[in-house]
Amino acid sequence: MKTLTRRQRFWLSLSLLWAGLWGASQWWEKGLAEPNGAPDISPYGCYRVQQFRPFWLLPGSFHPHPHPDDQMPTRWLVSWERPAFFRLYDNRSGQLLGESGIYDLVNYGGPYYWGHSNAPRVSMGMIDIGPNQPDCIGDRPS
C-alpha cells in the first residue's frame, strides 16, 4: 500500500477542513441568524412572517446565489445586495410552518402573497415561504 506524501496529506487535510467548514456554515447561516425588523402579520391575523439576515462570516460573493425557480441555475461569485430568508408561523399557535431559502431581496423580493384556494402558499415576491394551514387558506379563517 502506497503512503501519501507530505504534500498530498496537506491538500487532503485542507480539503477535509474546507468541507467541514462548508457543512457547518450551512447550519450556522440560519441557526445563528438574527431577526431583521418586526414580524409582518397577515391581514386577517392567521400568519406571521419574520425576516432574517443570514449569519455569514465570508463576504456574500463567496456564497451561492440561487434562483427561487429550481429550474434556473445557481450563480457563483455574484455580489448580494440584501440577503434574507423568512420563517412563517401560525400567528394563533406560534407553530413554525415553513422556512424559505436564502435569496437576494433586491432581485426576488416583492409584496406578500398570503395564499388562495388554488395556491395555498405564503410567498414574498418569487420567494416561497411555506404552506397555508387547512383552517386558514388564503388568510381567511374558517
Image (cartoon, grey):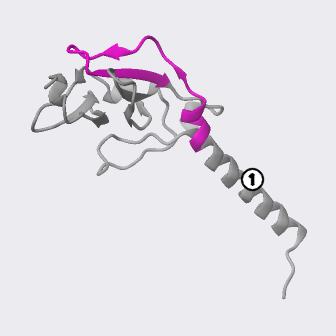
Residue 80 location, x and y as percent?
48, 29
Q: In which image quadrant can residue 41 be found?
A: top left
The answer to whether residue 108 shows anywhere in this view is yes
Residue extent of the magenta highlight? 26-52
Question: Which residue is at 20% across, 15% downward?
Answer: 44
Amino acid residing under circle 1 = Leu
Foreground of the two, 111 or 86: 86
Q: Label 1 belongs to which residue?
A: 17
Q: Is residue 25 above or below residue 116?
A: below
For residue 62, above or below residue 80: below
In the image, 15: left or right of 140? right
Q: Residue 26 is drawn in which quadrant?
A: top right
Q: Element under label 1? A: helix
Q: Is residue 81 visible?
A: no
Using the image, determine if residue 124 lies above or below residue 21: above
Between 84 and 78, which is closer to the camera in this rendering? 84
